Image (cartoon, rainbow, N blue to C red):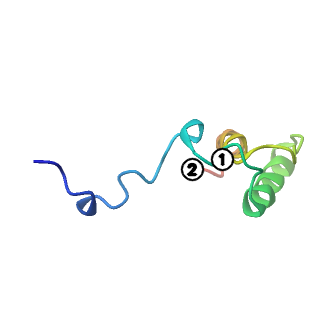
Amino acid sequence: MTDNPKDHPTGNAEKNPDDWTTGDEPMTGAQASYLKTLSEEAGAEFDDTLTKADASKRIDALQAETGRGA
């Protein structure tokens, strides 16, 4: 018997950005805004040409660097 996905509604909430079907689209406005804030806090360059997937990875890295993701 297979698990009912409704029993674990957030079980697939985190997906590797490399596996996103829309990962190659331009980053969203929300991603850009947050990434700009994180970049400023980390003293890092803000790249406004990132894709959704790359922006997500960069956000993760900057959160780790700034301590915001804790």
**Residue 4 vertical position relative to residue 39 in the rendered view, above or below:** below
Report which residue position mark 2 lands on.
70
Q: Is there CB contact under 8 Å for labels 2 and 1?
A: yes
Q: Quadrant of residue 23?
A: top right
Secondary structure at numbered mark 1: loop
> How many other residues sit within 10 Å of disc 2, few (<14), some (14-19) or many (≥20)?
few
Report which residue position mark 1 lands on.
67
| Circle 2: residue type | Ala
Q: Quadrant of residue 60?
A: top right
Q: Position of residue 54 (x, y in %)?
A: 71, 40
Image point (86%, 40%), residue name: 44
> How many other residues sit within 10 Å of disc 1, few (<14), some (14-19) or many (≥20)?
few
Image point (73%, 63%), residue name: 30
**Residue 22 vertical position relative to residue 19 in the rendered view, above or below:** below
Q: Position of residue 50 (x, y in %)?
A: 80, 43
Question: With 16 as the anchor, is 33 left or right in this view?
Answer: right
Is 12 or 67 nearer to us in this picture?
Answer: 12
